[in-house]
Amino acid sequence: MRTIATPFFAKSPYLFGPLMAMLFFFAAFLVASVYALRMNRNKAEELSKMPLEKEKESDPSTGEK
């Protein structure tokens, strides 16, 4: 099976798209990881509490303050 599959996949033009997609997502993951690891500790703490804070402005959908 290997003798048949290797030449087929080596010459297949359909492997370019998935290869580029994999490289794109790997690059995005690498950039996000470097950004997260280099982030200031105070900034990370501030961002981690962001979803838990109450809104300080009025909510226009309910009209409440």
Image: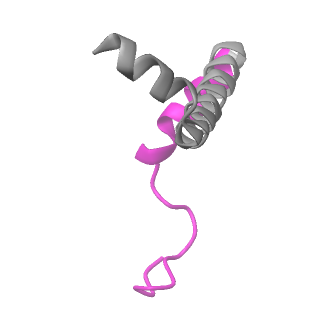
Q: How many marks?
A: 0
Place of residue 47 in the rendered image (x, y in percent of width and height, measured from the top left): 57, 35
Place of residue 62 in the rendered image (x, y in percent of width and height, measured from the top left): 40, 85
Q: Residue at x 61, y 20 (%)?
A: 33
Report the colour scheme: one colour
Closer to us: 50 or 34 = 34
Closer to us: 7 or 65 = 7
Place of residue 53 in the rendered image (x, y in percent of width and height, measured from the top left): 46, 48
Q: Residue at x 65, y 16 (%)?
A: 41
Q: Residue at x 48, y 27 (%)?
A: 9
In the displayed structure, 26 sits above or below 24; it is: above
In the shown orientation, is residue 36 left or right of residue 2?
Answer: right
Quadrant hosting residue 44: top right
Instruction: Look at the image and say whether residue 38 sits in the magenta stretch.
Output: no
* Residue furthest front in the image: 4
Magenta-highlighted residues: 41-65
In the shown orientation, is residue 15 left or right of residue 51?
Answer: right
Place of residue 4 in the rendered image (x, y in percent of width and height, measured from the top left): 37, 20
